Amino acid sequence: MRFGFFDDPNLEYVITRPDTPLPWINYMGMENYFGIISNTAGGYSFYKDARLRRLTRYRYNNAPLDEGGRYVYLRDNAAPLPAYWSASWQPVREALDAYECRHGLGYTTITAEKSGIRSRITYFIPLKDNLEIWRLEITNLRDVAADVSIFSAVEFCLWDAMDDATNFQRNLNIGEVEVEDGIIYHKTEYRERRNHFAYFACSEPLTGFDTSREAFLGPYRGWDKPLAVEHGQCGNSIAHGWQPVGVNHNRIVLSPGETRVVIYLLGYHENDENAKFDPKGSNTIDKTTVRPAIDRYRQPAVVEEAFNTLGSYWRELLSKFQVETPELHANRMVNIWNTYQIMVTYNFSRSASYFESGIGRGMGFRDSTQDLLGFVHLLPEKARMRLLDLAATQLPDGGAYHQYQPMTKLGNHDIGGNFSDDPLWLVLATAAYLKETGDWTILDESVPFDNKAGTEAPLFEHLRRSMQYTLDRIGPHGLPLIGRADWNDCLNLNSFSDTPGQSFQTVTAKDGKVAESVFVAALFILAAREMEQIASRLGKQADVEYYARYRAQFEDAIDTAGWDGAWFRRAYDDFGLPVGSFENEEGQIFIEPQGMCVMAGIGIEDGRAEKALDAVAEHLAFQHGIVLLYPAFKRYHLSMGEISSYPPGYKENGSVFCHSNPWIMIAETRIGRGDHALDYYLRINPSAREDLSDIHRCEPYVYAQTIGGKESATPGLAKNSWLTGTAAWNFVAITQWIMGIRPAYDGLIVNPVIPASWSGFKAVRYFRGTRYDIEVKREGPGNRVTLFVDGNKCEENMIPLPVDQPDMIMVNVVIG
Ligand code: GLC
Ligand code: GLC
């Protein structure tokens, strides 16, 4: 069952009924001011940091779902009894005669019709400015005049979202607002240490306003039935403490057929410390620098231009990589939605979504490094900055803080480090950056450790220490010690947590000298290959030999201790016993080492790779994707940690943990099985699952972190959409390995491993300033590739870098 449809030419997903199984959300903002918005206008806004500079309130985990948002109430003043509704259905939830929500790239438009009044609101954030625009177009479809009241409403958050939701003894006293020239200013704490405030303005003269929540809603009433709306009149209330809100009331009369545009602006502004007040010595905000922006954006022409600029920005970004394959779902995701989701993970990391409260986690070291694999071709300069920021949080021993705070860019002490995979992703991300850009200067950038001045070393030295971190921590089977966890945060082999509520991520009861990770061994091998390539290009022969030696050592360790007979083992626990082995009662086979070992090239020559992937097909794959492990843990295992704390079939305990599925897709291409790779790709592809929206429940236009596994009570049910490494990795799997278009240090590789049924495909990809027009034709059933560049046959599967920089290169590929 569907709740909408894709409008590909307009780059939109169109939702045709408001009561989607979950709020289906979208993102706004690119630089500093951001917001999330659902298909019924729920959501919130923040400046830079979703925890520390939250502008508006949102109530997670509430009933009804999705409370708090950018609400517009419409009231028919001529109706005999009070008649009002929401232009986005929520929060009033009055049945509408028509409803449509279009989520586009960086904006959302909601159309509603009721009793002959049509509203169409577009919400967006202009590219450069720190405000959001609600452009309301209201039309009278009746053949008589309509007397309408419009109430637009937000509830301000007192900046620190955590404090706002907990510290009521203080917060209920400090709320302050100002209303001047019909503009509402929210200035809680501005009197003292803040130099920022928010404002809510409107392009029409106000009929009235409210800034006290209780005055607007009325005592013991909710957002669904505000008293002011019911009465058709605001009380011009001024909030002193309690809950400050911003409500504009505009009463307008529309003649038959008339359309009116009203613009609302919700913004954030910072004043100079020395120019906070006007007059000086008062507590009144100095508006000299904020007014110009407000006055500018109140003009419809300026709004239209800002909206068009946003559209061009996105079209330009998407044009960097476009494909045309026989598979609609691949085209749609690669060309539009997967790319968009990757950009959202770039901007938001794991901070704010319908499942991430914006309070908890900062920027994850491994998360951000893997996200970069997806966006490096879109925003190379930002990728460069991100790499340097991440490296600056690295510790001198090569380890990494697991997370850092986006505002301060400092490592997060609460969570600390010692996740065994973190440092290695820095190597892989840097390698991806070098291959994409050819910008070798980044390796000489001087970067501190732990952000401490005086500790600076070139980025290349940071990579070395990343590698050394693994080499300094090798366990009894010659495999890397697992530490607190590796990529799988929930495989906590050293935590032995027996106290309710303890964080598995931070509790360590063992000295960690026994439990080992096969996954990290394979990850090291991948990273070592890159280090060998990088070092050899830098003429550092000793490094090349060093990493080659240890790579071989880990290859041996996986051969002797990592192979279980029919698949790769996952780990060794604190007792030195295998995890992910047929010897285990539960958790006999895990997905991660099957993907990562084959990606690292292990077992490809001798058939173990094929065996392992056959085992994946037999034990882990089912119609909704590939589950993380099988059989799921049915009881809590002290020695396994969080993984066994989840009910069977959920999250790391045997759901389809989508991030790990593309590793199997890539592994399948490594052994030439394009059919299998694409089949797995489509099982979790959101667009391909659109028809299952009632079962899948999350948005059909973006990947979710997890889908209920075969042993769960709800197979196929997705959770935690949007902010997941799944976005980057699926993009890598389909574009770089199935379509086989992947940047290399010295050129662009084109080595497709596509299904037998595909007759070919076309792609346009920008690479180091040149446009590559690639056309692939299948002439036989196999994977053998012959490349022609501008008509000339190429000896390898790689197009070497051109000597001059042509604007365009034509690539013809024959496979068979
Ligand atoms: C979550 C985390 C990620 C981790 C994964 C597996 O998605 O953000 O860092 O690798 O879970 O546990
Ligand atoms: C929990 C989740 C895991 C996530 C981690 C991050 O362990 O199961 O997916 O990576 O929290 O805090």
Image: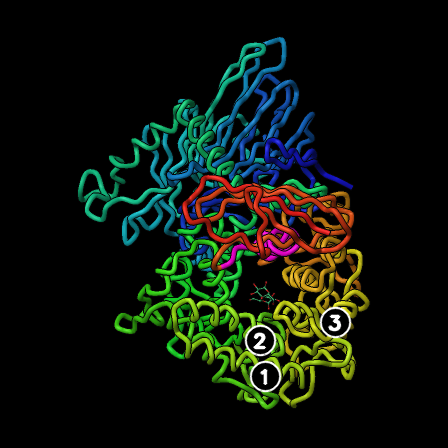
Dot 2 alpha-carbon crowd within 10 angstroms: few under 14, some 14 to 19, many 20 or more: many
In 3D space, how far apart are the residues under numbered discs 3 and 1 (Cα atoms)? Answer: 19 Å
Dot 1 alpha-carbon crowd within 10 angstroms: few under 14, some 14 to 19, many 20 or more: many
Q: Residue at x 57, y 10 (%)?
A: 145
Decide which of 127, 660 is in the foreground and name it.
660
The residue that label 1 is drawn on is: 479
The residue that label 3 is drawn on is: 612
Dot 3 alpha-carbon crowd within 10 angstroms: few under 14, some 14 to 19, many 20 or more: many
In the drawing, what numbered circle is on residue 520? Answer: 2
Q: Position of residue 217 (x, y in %)?
A: 53, 38
Callout 3: SS? helix
Residue extent of the magenta highlight: 728-744
Give the quarter of the figure containing the N terminus.
Answer: top right
Could you tell which of marks 2 and 3 lies nearer the N-terminus?
2
In 3D space, how far apart are the residues under numbered discs 2 and 1 (Cα atoms)? Answer: 8 Å
Image vertical order of residue 77 relative to residue 613, above or below = above
Q: Residue at x 47, y 63 (%)?
A: 431
Q: In the figure, residue 624 lies in which quadrant?
A: bottom right
Label 1 beta carbon within 8 A of ligand 1: no
Q: Position of residue 586 (x, y in %)?
A: 77, 78
Decide which of 680, 290 is in the foreground and name it.
680
In 3D space, how far apart are the residues under numbered discs 2 and 3 (Cα atoms)? Answer: 17 Å
